Image (spheres, rainbow, N blue to C red):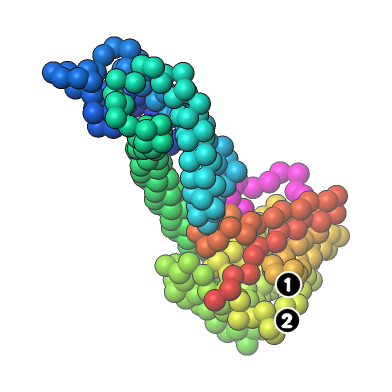
Amino acid sequence: MRKTNCRIGFNDGLLMIIGIPLLSFIIPIVFMNCRFNRPPYLTWDKYLATFMITTIIWVGNRYIMIYSRKKYPLFDEVRRRIVLQSVLMFVFTVTFNTILGRFTKEIFDAAAVGLSDVDVLIHSNSAALFCTIMIIAIYESIYFMHQLRQSVEETENLKRENLNAQLDALRTQVNPHFLFNNLNTLVSLIPENPKHAVDFVQQLSKLYRHILEVKDEKSILLKEELDVLKAYAFLLQTRFGHNLVVNIDVPEEKLNKRIVPLSLQLLMENAIKHNIVSSDKPLQINIFAENGSLVVDNTLQMKKQVTESTGIGLDNIRNRYKLLGDKPVTVTETETKFRVSIPLIEH
C-alpha cells in the first residue's frame, strides 16, 4: 500500500518528479520569451537555473502548506488557514525568488535585453508566483478531494454503526431471555395482582412500540425518551422489586432538549447486566441533568461472572453521537460508582 502524507492528502512524490521539470521548462518560454529557434535561446544553463529556483519554491511552499494545516486542522478553520498560507507563500516566493534571481542574473541577461531591472524583477516574480499558484491549485484540489472522500467514508461508517446499534437494540428487546423474564413476571402477577398485570402488559407494549417508532430517528425529545425509560424501569422494578432503585430527576426546562434514542435504556440495561441486584446489595440508578449533559450513574457492585455481551454498549452510543456533533460521551468510574454523561442536543 502506498504511503500517504496525511497533511498533503496524497503521495506527492510522482507529482514533484513530473511537475518541477515541466514547470522549469514552461517558465522560461512563457515568461522569459526563450525559444529553441531564435535568440534568446532556451539553453541548459537557463533550464537548470529555473529548475533550481522552481525546486526551492515548490519544496518551501509545500512545507508552508503542511505547517498551515497543522496549525488550523479543522474544517471551520479553512478560511484562516488559507489566509495564513497565502500570505506566507507570497512572502516566501517573492523573497527567495528575488534573492536567487541575483545569483542567476547573468544567465538570463540575454533574455532581458531592453528591459529595466524593475521589469526583469516583475517578470521573474510573475513566473515564481505562477509556479506558486499552480502548486496551490494542485495540492488544495487534491487535499479537498481527499478530505471529502474521508468525510463521506466516516459518515457512512457512522451511519452503519447507528443502524447496527438500533437493530441490536431491537434484537435485545425481543430475544428469548428478555421475553422469558417478562412473561414469567407476568405469569406470577396475573393471579396475585391482576390490575398490576394489566399495567405491566401496557408498559411492555409501550416499550416495544417506542422501539419500532424510533428505529429510523437520529434523535428524539428527552421528554419522550424519559417517558419510555419509566416504562422500562417499571418492568424491571416489577421483576426485581425493592432490589432495584431508579431515581429520575431532570428539570422541566431540559425536557425539550434532544437525545439519541434508546441510549438511556441501553445504559440502564448495562448497569443491571454487569452489577449485582439483590436484597443484600440493592442496585441504585440515578438519572439527572448536569452541565448540558444527562448523567446516568449507578452503584458499582460488579458480578463475578458477567453474562455474555450482546454488542450493545458505550461504543455504539458514542458512534451515534458522532453523527450529531462533536460533544463527547464521557465515562467516569470510581470504586463505588459508574457514571456516563451523554450530551443534550439543541433543536
**Residue 234 in magenta stretch:** no
- Write down the region rendered in magenta: 301-316
- State the image coordinates of residue 172 (x, y, percent, origin top left): 52, 59
The N terminus: image quadrant: top left
Distance from label 2 to label 1 (Cα)? 7 Å
Give the residue pinned by disc 2: 251
Does residue 200 show up?
A: no
The residue under the point 77% across, 61% down is 298
Residues 338 and 42: in front is 42
Residues 16 and 130: in front is 130
Give the residue pinned by disc 1: 289
Label 1 SS: strand
Label 2 SS: loop
Q: Amino acid at mark 1?
A: Ala
Graded by Cα atoms within 10 Å as few (under 14), some (14 to 19) or many (20 or more), the crowding at tag 2 reads few
Query: Furthest residue to the bottom?
Result: 195
Dominant secondary structure (helix, strand or loop) of the stretch shown in magenta: loop
Residues 24 and 41: in front is 41
Query: Furthest residue to the left?
Result: 37
**Quadrant of residue 346 within the rendered picture:** bottom right
In this image, 74 relative to 340: left or right?
left
**Quadrant of residue 68 within the rendered picture:** top right
